Image (cartoon, helix red, strand yellow):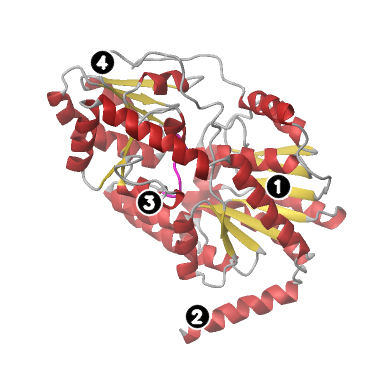
Amino acid sequence: MTSVSSEPVNLLQHSQAREAASGPSGPDTKLRLLYLCHRVPYPPDKGDKIRAFNEIRALSKRHRVHLLTLADSEVPNLAPLEEMCERVEVFPVQRTGAYMRAALGIFSSRPLTLAFFGSAELRQRVEELARNERFDLVVAYCSAMAPYVEPFHEVGTPAVLDMVDVDSSKWAQYSRFASLPMRPIYALEARRLQAYESSLASRFERIVLATGNETRVLKAFAPEANAATVPNGVDLDFFRPLDLPRSPHPTIVFTGQMDYFANVDGMVHFARNVFSRLRQRFPDLELLIVGRSPAPAVRALTELAGVHVTGAVGDVRPFLARAWAFVAPLRIAQGVQNKVLEAMAMNVPVVCTDRVFAGLSEGGFRHGRDLLAASSDQGLEDSLAGLLGDAQARASLAEHARRRLSLSYRWTTNMDRFEEILAGAVRKPARTREDREESREETKEKARSA
């Protein structure tokens, strides 16, 4: 395995410098917000952290943000978050204990996800804040944090849930591609999570999701949910074409957290079933798999000619700049893949599966104009082969994709929309505990009548 590392890039300092140059950001209409997050949203170097970080950064410009976050790994430098937030409190969750709780949760009726992210210390702190302090609004990031909002529901504080993706749908996909012993467990979690996600519709003033498709999935089984779509974004100033030469050899790149099940499944399948055939057509073809914590199955791919696994790197941009094409061969995908947006921002043409494309199509991206989408291994192989052999096609796709990206996926625009949703939730009269119980009973009655 090839190991590459460099100094981490400080995205916060980069963004703050750009914002300072652009001047003040609007009227002083400060709200006091409690933001609950399942992982420390810094550094913003993976999907869930990127979105949470940008939400906190945007909200902290005009409001007072009190951040409570779990940490299931080593706690990073908190100074960047402390600069933005009124207060930051971190509650460590030991992974060994979390996995044990999740395993034991099989014998209960609750989703295993809630057991994994369970913290008595965080629950106690939330109860204390609900008793003793006043917040205008509570923001919960992802469904795993929804249980911690309950003490604020009881005192009538309005709350918004950024579900991001419909996790039950993701677990249903896992059950199709996981090893046989895990399939029934993943299917069970999908059913439990869907029932739980449905119950959240009556507990939150608004539920936010990252794509219109995710919003439709939620509404299909929770039609009473007051759901809204707020897309992700990409920093087009940071992720921009670099003045670096492309690799002299045809090179394909993938970036991502390489112990994440969907990434492992997609890349192992692609490398062994598609890349190996592509290399017969392009004997000097290279595949760069860039990302931290590569799973054993990913590290084993280095036995294949032309495959390089980097492990953690401080900056993915030089690897993207080197590539002739970016491949997103994910068979399991929810929402928008930030890694794809970053590749497009750097003028790297993208080839992806139909499932990845589903998260991009509503942003105006079109197959054949902005990227290439395929529904089969053969389709991925043929699309990549065509691009690798046609420099003009690569340039055209890259140019159109970046232009479309700038129209649909700017953080500033999308976070303005997020702030509007929060403001609307604050203006809406908060429901009492009795109101919520009545709403839940109505939901149950509708389900019995259906």
Is 430 situated above or below 6? below
Q: Which circle's residue, 4 or 2, is located before the other in the chain?
A: 4
Q: Which residue is mark 2?
A: 447
Count of marks placed on residues:
4
Q: Residue furthest left?
A: 280
- Mark pair 4, 1: CA separation: 47 Å
- Marks 1 and 3: in contact by CB < 8 Å? no
Q: Nearer the viewer, mark 4 or mark 2?
A: 4
The main secondary structure of the magenta stretch is loop
Assign a secondary structure to mark 1. Answer: strand
Q: Dot 3 lies on which element?
A: helix
In three-dimensional space, the C-alpha distance between marks 3 and 2, rounded to whole angstroms, equals: 30 Å
SS class of the residue under badge 2? helix
Q: Residues within 10 Å of mark 4 (few under 14, many from 20)?
A: some
Dot 1: few (<14), some (14–19), or many (≥20) neighbours within 10 Å? Answer: many
Q: Which residue is mark 4?
A: 249
The residue lying toward the viewer, choosing from 160 and 261, is 160
Mark before the other along the chain sequence, 3 or 1:
1
Residue 275 x/y as whole percent? 21, 30
First in sequence: mark 4 vs mark 1 = 1
- Mark 1 highlights which residue? 35
Q: How far across and down, in percent of the image, does residue 38 sit?
A: 60, 44
Residue 302 falls within the magenta-colored stretch? no
What label does residue 358 carry, if any? 3
Q: Amino acid at mark 2?
A: Ala
CA distance for labels 4 and 2: 59 Å
